[in-house]
Amino acid sequence: ICHCPSSNMRLGAGIARVQDLVRAGARVGLGVDGAASNEDSNIAMEAHQALLLARVRNVDPRALDARAALRLATIGGAECLGRDDCGTLEPRKCADIACFRVDDLAHAGIVDLLAGIALAPPARAETVIVNGRVVVRDGRLLTADEREITRELSEAGARLRK
């Protein structure tokens, strides 16, 4: 089951019963849905939203913790796709890795950094490694021209609105 919390909230589609599904043995992962119902396509934001929605749905701050949200975003997604070659950082598994700064003022004094990252609005990744290749460094995309991509997407959106 692919849980897309931001899309569900935007569309008023309800709140998934994530904990019940997991307890029942269902494979549950996170998704970003599509551009029509989620402009951000940010899996870290989906983990953040899943965590908060579970707490609201269950009226319980312990309903979903940061580690469980991270699991949904990683191994949960791999399990949904029936893949055992990704989802965890282990030898001989493929992996994409996003690195975030936690040595800044926003994170100062936080005891549980994972919870701090999961509960705060998602920041832009400082470094991203895809299949062993650095594609983002110092927050900048290295593999394509961001301005050109933005221009092309804006033009495509304008054509769709016509």
Image (tube, rainbow, N blue to C red):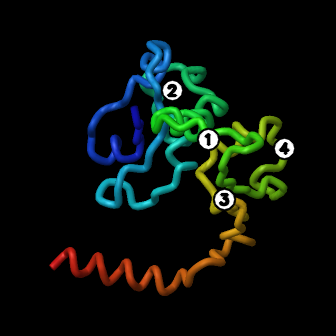
Label 3 neighbour load within 10 Å: few <14, some 14-19, many 20+: few
Helix, strand or loop status at disc 3: loop
* Residue 109: assigned label: 4
Mark toward the viewer: 4 or 2: 2
Q: Where is residue 17 in the image (x, y as percent from the top left)?
A: 40, 23
- Name the residue furthest front: 92
Mark 1 or mark 2, whichever is nearer to me? 1
In the rendered structure, are the residues bearing label 1 and label 4 in contact, judged by CB atoms less than 8 Å apart?
no
Tell me the distance, in whole angstroms, between the alpha carbons under discs 3 and 4. Answer: 33 Å
Other-residue count near label 2 (Cα within 10 Å), few / some / many at <14 / 14–19 / ≥20:
some
Numbered label attached to residue 85: 1
> What's the residue at 27%, 37% (across, down)?
13
Residue 131 numbered tag: 3
Q: Which residue lies furthest to the left in this view?
A: 162
Residue 27 lies left or right of residue 120; in this view the side is left
Whole-percent x, y for residue 86 in the image: 62, 42
In this orientation, does residue 51 appear? no
Q: Are marks 3 and 1 in contact (CB under 8 Å)?
A: no
Residue 91 horizontal side relative to residue 36, left or right:
right
Q: Callout 3, which amino acid?
A: Asn
User: Which kind of residue does numbered mark 1 sit on?
Assistant: Asp
Q: Are marks 4 and 2 in contact (CB under 8 Å)?
A: no
For residue 55, the mark is: 2
Which residue is drawn at the image coordinates 27% and 45% (left, top)?
A: 11
Q: Earlier in the sequence, mark 1 or mark 2?
A: 2
Task: Report how far apart the C-alphas of labels 1 and 2 lie in the structure.
Answer: 31 Å
Q: Nearer the viewer, mark 2 or mark 3?
A: 3
- Nearer to us of marks 1 and 4 is 1
Give me the disc on residue 145: none
| Alpha carbon separation for disc pair 2 and 3 | 34 Å
Q: Residue at x 62, y 37 (%)?
A: 70
